Amino acid sequence: MPGKILVTGGAGYIGSHTTLLLLEAGYQVVVVDNLSNSSLESLRRVENLTGKEVVFYKADIREKDKLISIFEEHQIDGVVHFAGLKAVGESTQIPLEYYEQNVYGTVSLLKVMQQFNCLRIVFSSSATVYGDPATVPITEDFPVSATNPYGRSKLYIEEIMRDLAISNDAWNIILLRYFNPIGAHDSGQIGEDPQGIPNNLMPYISQVAVGKRDKLSVFGGDYPTIDGTGVRDYIHVVDLSDAHVKAIQKIESLNGVSTFNLGTGKGYSVLQMVDAFKEGAGKAVPYEIVERRPGDIAECWADASLAEKILGWKASRGLQEMVNDTWRWQSSNPNGYKN
């Protein structure tokens, strides 16, 4: 029976798409977001697309009093937790900010959930917790380590949640380790709207194509891969969001902590992505190969068969659909939500 779900960071890229799918699946959604790296316009558009209301609170998950008042006002049945900082490069510059917002923020949220006996949470983790894997594809039982503070913050949160589940076996916790989300809703109404210079490949490519940036910098052309550029598992954001809905639907039957990879099981190089974009958008994307970035690895893709087996979830959208949906969003919204 659908209930009321709290989505932290619900105005962000993955959060807004997940909010939309939760509404379509019949859930009521309460969003908490501090809007530091997101826009309220995304939720207005979600309401337009679904014809349903999103209850919104501008708040930071570190503000425990605000969280308490939200839980007092609403009977929350479960939480999908996206809120946090998410740029690998930036995390090496301001690590304390990452630990405070991501780790302390999550502890604050979990304390309030515990206080109100709301013991179901789906956490937005990351494939960065695998560090530099010895082999690919990556399964959930691979050793974990991190090469940057962002990845380490995700790892610490996973460990905190495991400790919590050991302390009280009434908790139901799902950790979703994402590979590389790209794409946008097929309406072209909601998509990725990074503040400043994009940290991720696809928004950078699309900003070059739309004329906002001169060229793409490709970090490293000498990796032991098909064309020397880094290989990653790219997953459509709507497929990714669908996994969160499936997780919420299944969470009651999964005791303790369950961990799932979310990817397509295929790896594409940076230059393959550039070619796919050229085909989808009909636009050339000028690029130059520059030095490798510290902490980057040669290749990384998922074995996501466990999510299919337990959650009944599988990515269904292919690379060209990811590219076409990205371009539809970017070309309709060249300045993101600031149009």
Image (cartoon, grey):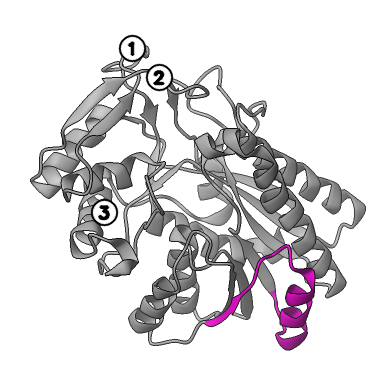
User: In the rendered image, which residue does mark 2 sit on?
Assistant: 292
Type of residue at label 3? Answer: Thr
- The residue shown at (10%, 38%) is 284
Image position of 215 with respect to 252: above or below: above
**3 vs 2, front mark:** 2
Q: Is residue 72 on the magenta stretch?
A: yes
Image position of 130 with respect to 261: above or below: above
Marks 1 and 3 in Cβ contact (< 8 Å): no
User: In the rendered image, which residue does mark 3 sit on?
Assistant: 326
Q: Earlier in the sequence, mark 3 or mark 2?
A: 2
Where is residue 310? Give x, y as percent. Answer: 59, 51
Can residue 255 be seen here? The reply is: no
Among the 4 quarters of the image, the one containing residue 198: top left
Among the 4 quarters of the image, the one containing residue 41: bottom left
Numbered disc 2: secondary structure: loop
Type of residue at label 1? Answer: Asp
The mark found on residue 329 in the picture is: none
Q: Is residue 133 on the magenta stretch?
A: no
The mark found on residue 222 in the picture is: 1
The residue range painted magenta reads: 55-77
Q: Nearer the viewer, residue 250 or 173?
A: 173
Image position of 93 with respect to 28: above or below: above
Numbered disc 1: secondary structure: loop
Type of residue at label 2? Answer: Arg
Q: Which of marks 2 and 1 is nearer the N terminus?
A: 1
- The residue shown at (78%, 84%) is 72
Marks 2 and 1 in Cβ contact (< 8 Å): yes
Q: Residues within 10 Å of mark 3 (few under 14, many from 20)?
A: many
Numbered disc 3: secondary structure: helix
